[in-house]
Image (spheres, rainbow, N blue to C red):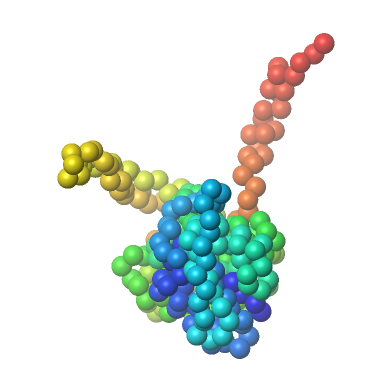
Amino acid sequence: MRILLTNDDGFFAPGLQTLYHTLATNPAYEITIVAPEGQRSAVGHAITLFEPLFAAKHTLKFGGEGFAVRGTPSDCVKLALQGDIVFKPDLLISGINLGQNLGTDVFYSGTVSAALEGALLGVPALAVSLASYEFRDFQPAADFVLKLLRNLNRISDGGLINVNIPGLPTKDWQGVKLTRLGKAVYENIFESRKDPRGRIYYWQSGTLTPDKEEDTDLRAVQEGYISITTMHSDLTDYNRLKSLTVLTEHLNFTS
């Protein structure tokens, strides 16, 4: 299987490099990397239109070439799949990200957006995140991805799968749950500060309110489970669409 790796933490980020080493040493997989040259977290699905995309080529340890791109995660996927700089992959994996990508956070996530871009371009994709900033051992998460790949045909129909792994030693994992996206509600704080020249700027931070609904990705990870959520790009609210049908009677022009 040919696999393209990308992320939003950067080409040399430990999560991506651990996953690369784990997969590339397995003869079943041929791996290449196209990822941002540096940190590009929380850029969402942004793409670069008015600046060039510089791509530095790197020889990969276990063969082949990778590219560190001065662009967003979505830029990297577009360049890889449509720019003919690497082989056409059978699967795209975005990650392993440092920190969770749960609930409505997926709208801001460069990790998930890169995977979604792959799915939009016809390549099945996984977004994989280690849901912690304190626990930084990526090897258990990489080993789980390897196990997931061996069973991918059981859960994937060719779209996007968002995987969040609790920041715990493997022995403390409670299992795996199939989940829906929860609601990641933040109590945001904007701290006002002054720079040395007296200019005011703001620093954003926030506290996540726990999601208590049973079947969500947030709840699963809080309880020590690996969360697997299937996703697609269709944001249409079909129930509301039906309820608004009567509106067309008032908006349509009649002669």
Q: In this view, does 18 lie to the left or right of 234?
A: left
Residue at 50% x, 85% y: name it: 61
Residue at 56% x, 85% y: name it: 63
The answer to whether 165 is drawn above or below residue 78 in the figure is below
Q: Position of residue 143 (x, y in %)?
A: 49, 80
Furthest residue toward right: 255
Residue at 46% x, 70% y: name it: 11
**Which residue is nearer to you in this view: 144 or 252?**
252
Q: Quadrant of residue 100?
A: bottom left
**Which residue is nearer to you in this view: 163 or 52?**
52
Residue 112 in view? no
Q: In which quarter of the image is residue 118?
A: bottom right
**Which residue is nearer to you in this view: 162 or 60?**
60
Q: Is residue 246 left or right of residue 180?
A: right
Q: Quick one: quadrant of the C terminus? A: top right
Residue 195 in view? yes
Q: Position of residue 8 (x, y in %)?
A: 46, 62
Residue at 53% x, 71% y: name it: 67
Q: Where is residue 229 in the image (x, y as percent from the top left)?
A: 56, 60
Furthest residue toward top: 255
Q: Where is residue 254 in the image (x, y as percent from the top left)?
A: 80, 13
So how many labels did they put on this image?
Answer: 0
Q: Quick one: quadrant of the N terminus? A: bottom right
